[in-house]
Amino acid sequence: MSSQRSARPSASDPEGGGIAILGAGALGRLWAARLPPTASGFVPRNPSALSSFRLHYHFRDSEGREHAVTRPWLTTLSDVTLLLVTTKAGDTLEALEQVIGRIPESCPVVLFQNGLGSQQAVAARWPARPILAASTTEAANRPAPDRVVHAARGHTWIGALTEPATDLVAGIIRQLSPSGLDVRGEVRILERLWGKLAINAGINPFTALLDCPNGEILESRLFLDSIDALCEELANLIAAEGLPPHSPRILRNDIERVARNTASNTSSMRGDVQSGRTTEIDYINGYVANRSRELGLTAPVNQMLTDRVKELVPHPSN
Ligand SMILES: NC(=O)c1ccc[n+]([C@@H]2O[C@H](COP(=O)([O-])OP(=O)(O)OC[C@H]3O[C@@H](n4cnc5c(N)ncnc54)[C@H](OP(=O)(O)O)[C@@H]3O)[C@@H](O)[C@H]2O)c1
């Protein structure tokens, strides 16, 4: 690969490839590192402020092997064939507003955000575009600005959110398959996102408030005093949404099992609080509280956890 190119990289550039990644953080860099070097590039936040046409970082794979990664910043997006959106939930709509007019109308947009709320907002804003959501259990973190660690292998499920995306899932899976990551189609993607949200709602805020790894929440007074009511609020909302019912007891068992299986992990919410970054609480427990209100239910425990996490670091007001 030449490092002396004068042309501005585009997605049709043989070095740029057809996959554009919006959000050059932990998850976006994981995908770029796993895809072949010529297959993808990153969408810059502000193309005119780029000091280099390439992004360099060190990648540690899930087996502990390290290698250097160099991928282009894409300044031309007219030939992009797939857009992976790996911004945080709260940044996604605004980030896409800047970019969507520059990609072809037929280009599928795959949203990787945790929680719920941001996906529906994007699908409602661009219903005629092929918008999809992904739910992934791959885990990546960024211990330093130029280092990304693939902390755990997992699975990624992709499903359509808008009608024009319905028949595109198989093609997207084919485009992502050179990554070697496990990617599957999911017809009921909202149900899958709900399942992950429920687990995150029962683990993440406790780890952030108690500043502890996942497993330690299980013995804490805060968790023991609120988990049953939290699971009841989740079960009531899941039923009101018309999704397959979950009993509060099964939800609690699932939350406790995941917390035990990931006992030494630091949740993304705890990590965000430790670094003073805005958390995704508005799209997890905050989503449960707001959506419950919209459907005439109450969710005081989810609201309390949302309010308390938002006191830890500044969050934009809703
Ligand atoms: N990491 C994981 O293992 C994982 C697993 C499952 C799901 N997810 C979900 O994936 C999403 C991303 O997670 P992450 O851990 O990768 O977060 P992250 O490391 O914070 O990365 C987000 C990236 O988006 C960039 N960004 C924000 N606004 C932008 C804009 N307008 N234009 C271009 N780039 C913009 C940020 O740039 P700045 O740093 O300059 O702000 C940052 O590099 C989250 O919703 C998370 O819940 C992550």
Image (spheres, grey):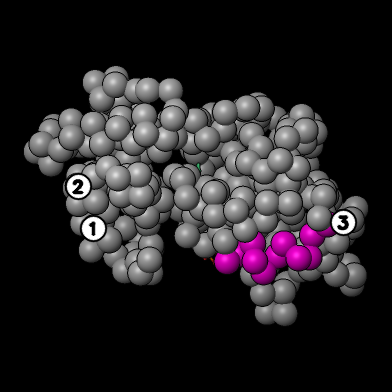
Give the image location of residue 229, x and y in percent.
Answer: 18, 35
Quadrant housing the N terminus: bottom right
Give the image location of residue 60, x and y in percent.
Answer: 57, 42
Type of amino acid at the residue the image marks with label 1: Asp
Give the image location of residue 142, x and y in percent.
Answer: 49, 52
Q: What span is colored magenta in the figure?
A: 94-104
* Quadrant of residue 260 within the rendered picture: top left
Question: Do we see residue 31 in this rendering?
Answer: no
Type of amino acid at the residue the image marks with label 2: Pro
Identify the secondary structure beneath mark 2.
helix
Give the image location of residue 81, x and y in percent.
Answer: 82, 48
Q: Is residue 220 left or right of residue 103?
A: left
In three-dimensional space, the C-alpha distance between marks 2 and 3, rounded to whole angstroms, equals 48 Å
Q: Is mark 3 within 8 Å of ligand 1?
A: no
**Mark closer to the chain start, 2 or 1:** 2
Please give the residue where the numbered disc 3 appears in the rendered image: 79
Contact, CB < 8 Å: mark 3 with mark 1? no
Label 1 crowd (10 A; few <14 / some 14-19 / many >=20): some
Label 3 crowd (10 A; few <14 / some 14-19 / many >=20): some
Please give the residue where the numbered disc 1 appears in the rendered image: 307
